Amino acid sequence: MARSDWKESPEQKRQRALDICERLAAAYPESRCALCWETPFQLLIATVLSAQTNDQAVNRVTRELFRQFPDARAMAAAPEGAIEACINSIGLWRNKAKFLRGISRILVEKYNGEVPKDLDALMELPGVARKTATAVLGTAFGIAAGITVDTHMMRINRLLHLSDATSPDKMARDLEALLPRDQWNIYTHRIIDHGRLVCVARRPRCGVCPLAECCPSACDPDVGYDPRNDEREPASAKGLSWLQKCD
């Protein structure tokens, strides 16, 4: 169906959003954060490192980073060069090393080395924007402070016509008004896995999509659908959250 043909009332949209949540839960019951972490501090650091970097690359560098500097006190006391040496294979590593040391020092000075369970407090830390703060609160503490929006979320929710926002913050507000609060944390993880396995950018596999019946963009050639896509396992499938090894 062409996008321009899709019409629904606000209540119909809300019910369709619930249907989408149920279908995602059935399709991706094991979805979780794909970053490797053992403590809220480690999740915060890994999430900061994940900006403009894929989760697999972050997991490769955090293994040694967290071996040397497992908590805020150890990282705050570390020379910046030592942090850089652990993370210099990922993008923006010099800036990120500064952020990591700055975050650690503030946590030690203001929060006794602990990660605060407060959105505003987290967003005051160097390199921590709303996306990072909501991800940490949701994953580490189970606090639904907001919906985390990444590139998969931007693309797929626009295809689903759940939001037409062009900025992550606006999309987050749209989705928060639409989805039950108990779905806020897991919805992002499931959409990310869906984007890696089925709703792949430029080559969506609509013929095998569990959301096809409730997606206004399903099987639309204008978004790149070709029946041949259905038989191809995308390269991005290796990034599925439940496949990441954190031992």
Image (cartoon, rainbow, N blue to C red):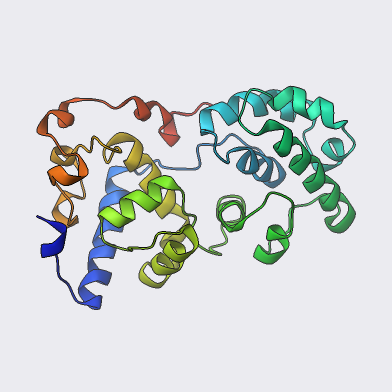
Residue 194, horizontal then vertical, whole percent: 32, 42
Q: Quadrant of the C terminus?
A: top right
> Which of the two residues, 94 or 119, is positioned nearer the viewer here?
94
Residue 164 in view (yes/no): yes
Tell me if residue 152 comes above or below residue 123 in the rendering. Answer: above
Residue 246 visible? The answer is no
| Whether residue 224 is situated above or below residue 163 in the rendered picture | above
Q: Nearer the viewer, residue 205 or 43?
A: 205
User: Which one is in front, 166 or 133?
Assistant: 166
Residue 65 rendering spot, x and y as whole percentages: 73, 28
User: Who's the residue at 66% across and 38% down the image?
Assistant: 38
Q: How many marks?
A: 0
Q: Quadrant of the N terminus?
A: bottom left
Q: In this image, 118 relative to 183: left or right?
A: right
Q: Residue at x 78, y 40 (%)?
A: 98
Displayed quadrant of residue 161: bottom left
Task: Name the residue at 60% across, 24% down.
Answer: 60
Residue at point 40%, 59% (across, down):
166
Q: Is 179 located above or below residue 75 in the figure? A: below
**Where residue 8 appears, x then y in whole percent?**
17, 72
Q: Position of residue 190 (x, y in %)?
A: 38, 47
